[in-house]
Image (spheres, helix red, strand yellow):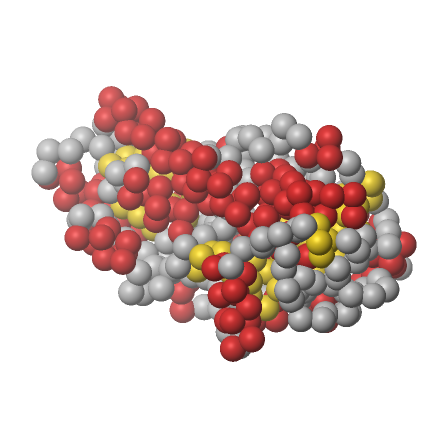
Amino acid sequence: MSLFFFLQNFFLTHFPFGNTLIVPDIPCSAAGKIKRKRGICEMKKRVGILTSGGDCPGLNATIRGVAKALYARMGDNVEIVGILNGYHGLINGEYREMCEDDFRGILTLGGTILGTKRTPFKLMRVVEDDKIDKVAAMKKTYKDAKLDCLLCLGGNGTHKTANLLSQEGLNIIGLPKTIDNDIYGTDVTFGFHTAVDIATEVIDRIHTTAGSHSRVMCIEIMGNKAGWLTLYSGIAGGADIILLPEQPYDIDRVCEAVERRAKRGSNFSIIAVAEGAMNVDEAKLKRKEWTAKRAEAGYTTATNRIAAAVQKKTGMETRVCIPGHMQRGGSPSAYDRVLATQFGSYAAKLVEIEQYGVTVALVNNHVISNRLEDIAGKTRNIPEGCELLTVAKRMGISLG
């Protein structure tokens, strides 16, 4: 982080807005400079908001946090424009004017009132059969909607496209959303803690049925490139074996862990498997290579194959449970509501001082901003020295 960003984040965090805020003369996208009196920004701004990628708990809470803070700070001098269905809507010119009533009653509401679609970053520069230049189309919608800035709520792909648009000259602010908790530069993303609660409840409930039937239960937890959700929920739910993308597993070691429990008198075992878990042989290949091999063999995740191998090698009846989209549905937890409100209100600050080309983050319990160019395209994986990995090993949890 540059000295400028460090100092700016320090003052934003430790010296919140009062009745008058003195900031450097930053050119506005419209005429003149920002004028403030009694805490109200007197220059009108049009702020666009979109949600992109998979939905997760906390999107609406974040949208609300942005809107309430903007209205509180700027009053009638802000207009909010909702871009519908993520970048798809930005490409196709789908947006609508929002009013304060739109943001009432959505703090606890799951999903997103703006709708969302996946628009892969790798296709943003590709002109497909529809002949649409996606980047040019997004810039046109931004201009047609007369936006002063655009807030993009999403995960890694969303942030890569946000950085692209920033480099194209648009005023962009990102907000980190994903239940995978894998966005680089932030300690946590909104939606993650709710998903941990949900996945933990699934594991909790599986314990009784596994014990009643003397079974091994393999529970597939979301997380393709990073295993944070599986690690947290696995520990919280008392899983016996946790398989992560960052820790390639050996199926023989997995079976040995199951057999050790059986010898100690346990008639069941719980295996938490991340979607992106790979075995030691796959780990020797590039990601594209082993995913292609799986596709050729007719599968994407290894959970069913792990279950089949465990049953064959141990003789214990083994079943698979896939909670799937349940993990990202429903009302956000209290933690995520608070975090979403923190992120949203901070993004509103960034709008007011016209700090663009950044994304919001939580680092050491302080909300800060990171430059989009510094975090786009990077994944926050579980590091080898992660304390929770050490905790798991101390507890006798097998990592495969």
| Closest to the observer, 354 or 238 | 354
Residue lying at 66% horizontally and 51% vertically, measured from the top left: 39
Residue at far top of view: 212
| Closest to the observer, 284 or 146 | 146
Q: Quadrant of residue 136?
A: bottom right
Q: Quadrant of the C terminus?
A: bottom left
Q: Is residue 103 above or below residue 44?
A: above
Residue lying at 29% horizontally and 65% vertically, measured from the top left: 385
- Position in image of residue 233 (x %, y %): 35, 42
Q: Is residue 51 visible?
A: no
Residue lying at 72% horizontally and 70% vertically, measured from the top left: 26
- Position in image of residue 71 (x %, y %): 70, 43
| Closest to the observer, 197 or 255 | 197
Count the labels in the image: 0
Residue lying at 58% horizontally and 54% vertically, measured from the top left: 17
- Position in image of residue 12 (x %, y %): 54, 61
| Closest to the observer, 26 or 199 | 26
Q: Is residue 351 left or right of residue 400?
A: right
Q: Is residue 178 above or below residue 126?
A: above
Q: Is residue 339 visible?
A: yes
Q: Is residue 89 left or right of residue 388?
A: right
Q: Is residue 70 left or right of residue 109?
A: right
Residue at far bottom of view: 3
- Position in image of residue 263 (x %, y %): 10, 39
